Amino acid sequence: MPPAQRSMVREIFCVQLLAALVTCGLFAYTVVSPVVIKPVELSNATATNEGFDYSRDNEELLEGINSKEPMKLLEEGKGVEARARAWEIGNTWKKRKDVQEMMAAGNVLTDSDATRDIWKGFRLLEKSLELAPKSKFVRLNFARQLFKRGQTEKAEEMYEDLLKISDPSWVTPRIELAEIYLMDDKTLRSIELFNEVLKERPKDPRITKRLGLALTVNGDRDKGFDTFVQGCAYEQDNQDWQPEIKKLIEKNAGLIESAISDVYSQVEAHPDDIKLKIKLARLQIAYNRLKDAKKHLLDARKKRETDPEVHEVLSEVLFRLGNTEEARAEFGTTARLLPLSKPAAPPVPYEPTQEEMDKEVELNSIVSEEQLKDMEAAKKADQEGASEEAPAEETPAEAQPEEEQPKEEEPKE
């Protein structure tokens, strides 16, 4: 967080004006491009002097965010209430000592359309990383939000930093970064990362299919499509469905038909939800109901022709139905649309007020209840002192009747 700036209205001298202009420019840059804390070497210690227990640095840390109040409100569709609660948490010094609270509040606010919310959200995510600078999962969460808000270059830098401090067996950040590079026209690096992951997880259907897409985007269409088809075969032969599909099946006691019925009812309730239609199609592919899957995907394509995932899943269905040429065409469309699906660049950055900047500095400086009490006492004393020093308003004196002046005698002629 940049230091508080002096008011340019109170003190304007030539040198100070120049410094203020430079400072304002730098601050505006930090608003749109949050400070990225560089990685440090990981140690085996479970706790450090910053107070974060690193034995908690795992998937459960991310899953725990969803149990926080702002995230629960957002999940319930109460966006306004969720953002209000996130602001409240962000302005409470005790909550600012909790990594998960900062991550949850930061995620909710950076998902907002309001630039002021986005500004505050990234301040809170920076705080989460400040509380746990060695945490891989805190850094992963931050990188994800940067990408979602269109700050692709910053996200790529943070992911690359994350790869340097994580074991190659942890494939999640590698897969996500490969996907980002695929959308950002950096296909050679994307192919490299997908191949690294396949060394750790040979015959992984999802990674094999994504490698096929990367090869196609890079210009090798035949090899790309063949690789994609190979990934589809791995998926069918090993019943190794996408994690989301696996969870749906497990939720329905392992019964795919029951999972299909569940999602089908959701599609009927929300017929314009493209993601639900894709989810239903994937379940139908798993149950070999290919014609039904094709029907829903064609409907989804009609409603959103620019969605690369619709074309990708439709390509798989068409190939399984024996329509190879149509499948190749859909796969080619997927590769063409994929680089266009990158999140939009960030909006014009919010310019915080002096009061908001001072508030952030103050919240970051509080380390104990006693300090907070001392600060509040000092503020109260300042306010009382200011009121005592204020000059008392003068009460207008009662109007006194004017004394009658003796009239001057007129001179006699």
Image (spheres, rainbow, N blue to C red):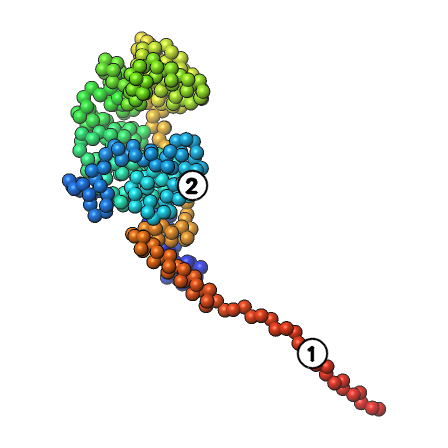
State if disc 1 and disc 2 touch (CB < 8 Å): no
Q: On the rendered image, what quadrant is the C terminus found in?
A: bottom right
Q: Is residue 152 visible?
A: no
Residue 394 figure quarter: bottom right
- In this picture, residue 251 sits left or right of residue 410: left
Q: Amino acid at mark 2?
A: Ala
Position of residue 25 measured from the top left corner of the image (x, y, whole percent): 37, 50
Q: Is residue 167 above or below residue 405?
A: above
As helix, strand or loop, the secondary structure at mark 2 comes to helix
Q: CA distance from mark 2 to mark 1?
A: 65 Å
As helix, strand or loop, the secondary structure at mark 1 comes to loop
Q: Which residue is nearer to you in this view: 364 or 319?
A: 364
Q: Amino acid at mark 1?
A: Glu
Position of residue 362 measured from the top left corner of the image (x, y, whole percent): 35, 53
- Residue placed under numbered mark 1 in the picture: 402
Q: Residue furthest right?
A: 413
- In this picture, residue 132 sits left or right of residue 2: left
Q: Is residue 198 above or below residue 78?
A: above
Q: Which residue is nearer to you in this view: 360 or 118?
A: 360
Position of residue 32 measured from the top left corner of the image (x, y, whole percent): 36, 43
Query: Mark 2, residues whose alpha carbon is within 10 Å: few (<14), some, or many (≥20)?
Result: some
Position of residue 317 measured from the top left corner of the image (x, y, whole percent): 33, 13
